[in-house]
C-alpha cells in the first residue's frame, strides 16, 4: 500500500508508461479536457468546485517524477495569475514558459502528452503542462 505521493491507480499506471520528454497536463476545472487533449490518458479528479486543486495534484506528482520544463497559459492581457507564483514555488529553478491560450491548447494536443488530469480547481489560468525529466 502506498503511503505518500500519488496513490491514484490510473495516474500511477499512466506515469509508469512515461519517459523522458513525455508531457503531463494538470488542468483546472474549466479546461476543455475532452476537446483540447490528444489521444492521451485522461483522468477526471474533480470532486466539487475547488477540490482537488491543481497544486494538490502537482505536489503529489512531484513526489513521483522529475520535471525538466513547464508551460502555462498566459492571459491575453499579459497579466500574471497569482497561481503562477505557486507553480514557481513548487518548481524552483524552472522557468515557466508562457504560451497564449491557443498555443497552449495546441501543445496539449501533441502526441507527446501522455496524461491529462482534470481537477476541481477554480483559480483562473491554473493549467500547467509538465515535461518529464530523467530519473
Image: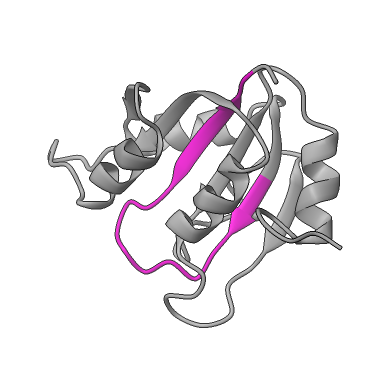
Q: Quadrant of residue 93?
A: top left
Seen at 80% across and 59% down, the residue is 2
Q: In the rendered structure, does residue 127 fall within the stretch colored magenta?
A: yes
Q: Could you tell whether 46 is left or right of 96 in the image?
A: right
The N terminus is located in which quarter? Answer: bottom right
Where is residue 96? Give x, y as percent.
Answer: 34, 27
- Residue 101 versus residue 107 in the image, above or below: below
Where is residue 110? Give x, y as percent.
Answer: 64, 27
Q: Could you tell whether 41 is left or right of 108 in the image?
A: right
Seen at 60% across and 28% down, the residue is 66
The colour scheme is one colour
Seen at 30% across and 48% down, the residue is 86
Where is residue 39? Give x, y as percent.
Answer: 77, 40
The C terminus is located in which quarter? Answer: top right
Q: In the rendered structure, does residue 131 fall within the stretch colored magenta?
A: yes
Q: Quadrant of residue 9?
A: bottom right
Seen at 37% across and 22% down, the residue is 94
- Residue 72 versus residue 50 in the image, above or below: above
Total marks shown come to 0
Where is residue 107? Give x, y as percent.
Answer: 53, 29
- Residue 120 versus residue 133 in the image, above or below: below
State which region is magenta: 116-133
- Residue 22 versus residue 129 in the image, above or below: above
Amino acid at each position: 500500500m502506498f503511503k505518500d505521493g500519488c496513490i491514484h491507480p490510473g495516474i500511477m499506471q499512466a506515469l509508469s508508461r512515461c519517459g523522458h520528454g513525455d508531457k503531463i497536463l494538470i488542468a483546472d476545472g474549466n479546461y476543455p479536457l475532452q476537446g483540447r487533449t490528444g489521444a492521451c490518458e485522461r483522468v477526471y479528479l474533480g470532486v466539487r468546485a475547488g477540490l482537488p486543486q491543481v497544486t494538490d495534484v502537482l505536489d503529489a506528482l512531484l513526489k513521483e517524477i522529475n520535471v525538466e520544463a513547464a508551460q502555462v497559459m498566459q492571459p491575453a492581457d499579459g497579466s500574471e495569475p497569482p497561481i503562477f507564483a505557486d507553480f514557481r514555488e513548487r518548481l524552483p529553478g524552472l522557468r515557466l514558459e508562457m504560451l497564449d491560450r491557443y498555443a497552449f491548447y495546441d501543445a496539449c494536443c501533441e502526441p507527446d502528452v501522455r496524461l491529462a488530469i482534470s481537477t476541481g480547481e477554480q483559480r483562473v489560468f491554473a493549467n500547467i503542462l509538465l515535461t518529464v525529466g530523467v530519473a
